[in-house]
Image (cartoon, rainbow, N blue to C red):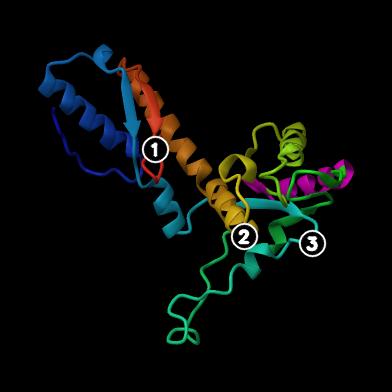
Amino acid sequence: MSIAKTRTTPADPAIGMMAGIRELLHRAGAAPGDVSHLLFASTVATNAVLQLAGARVGLIVTRGFRHILEIGRANIPGRLTNELRYRRPERLVPLERIREADERCLSDGAVLRPLDEPTARAAIRELIDADVECVAVALLHSYANPAHERRIRELIADQAPRMAVTLSSDVLPEYREYERTMTTVLNAYVMPAMSRAVRGLERRLGAESLTPAVAVVRSDGAS
């Protein structure tokens, strides 16, 4: 086994990674074609959140849940000792970039109110006009029935084919609306930065005749 460590290159993580790959190939006496798999683990997403340098996100929720991120949960870190000093973290999606979809599914997946597509299209247009870079969609009980979220993704594609979209039913198909919505927003917030990093890596790999299968390592260690 060979190990190489190179300097971090924040402007383009792929530069540092390629330097490490070259070093490993040299030590192993291997050729670029010998590399079959590559795991890309970085702090690109973490840094985007910590530095509040992520994407300009728009959020679509079920009608009546526009304030879901503001309501959050009642538990406060250091309760009783820190309650008076506690300040909520900066919102990743301000209220003016949150829109409501007129629809409703029940916890068993049954459709109580079908998706009103004309109002959904209007909401999407408002977000596009607000210059959002990506859209997060987190509808009530979509873990049980993702049909409305998926239809909204199609409606977004009709108006903005290149728009990045994150569905809560894809990211975290579990109950608890606040946690699911926050996770979906976070995923949307870091998508453009991660996409740029991965595309940059793939371009640099190709320029050096490296064609491995690239997998991105998630925060839970999976890929």
What residue is at 40 percent from the left and 34 percent from the top?
223
| Element type at mark 2 | helix
120 within the magenta span: yes
Residue 212 lies, in percent from the top left, at 34, 19
Residue 135 lies, in percent from the top left, at 65, 46
Cα–Cα span, label 2 and label 3: 14 Å
Query: Residue 25 occupies which quadrant of the picture?
Result: top left
Which label's residue is closer to the chain start, 1 or 2? 2
Q: Amino acid at mark 2?
A: Tyr
Let me know if residue 55 appears in the view: no
User: Of helix, strand and loop, which mostly describes the magenta segment?
Assistant: helix
Q: Amino acid at mark 3?
A: Gly
Category of crowding for the residue at label 2, using alpha-carbon neighbours closer than 10 angstroms: few (below 14), some (14–19), many (at least 20) = some
Q: Which mark is residue 178?
A: 2
Residue, disc 3: 64
Residue, disc 1: 222
Category of crowding for the residue at label 3, using alpha-carbon neighbours closer than 10 angstroms: few (below 14), some (14–19), many (at least 20) = few
Residue 92 lies, in percent from the top left, at 57, 59
Give 116 or 147, whichever is nearer the viewer: 147
Q: Quadrant of the N terminus?
A: top left
Q: Amino acid at mark 1?
A: Ala
Q: The magenta stretch spans which residues? A: 117-137
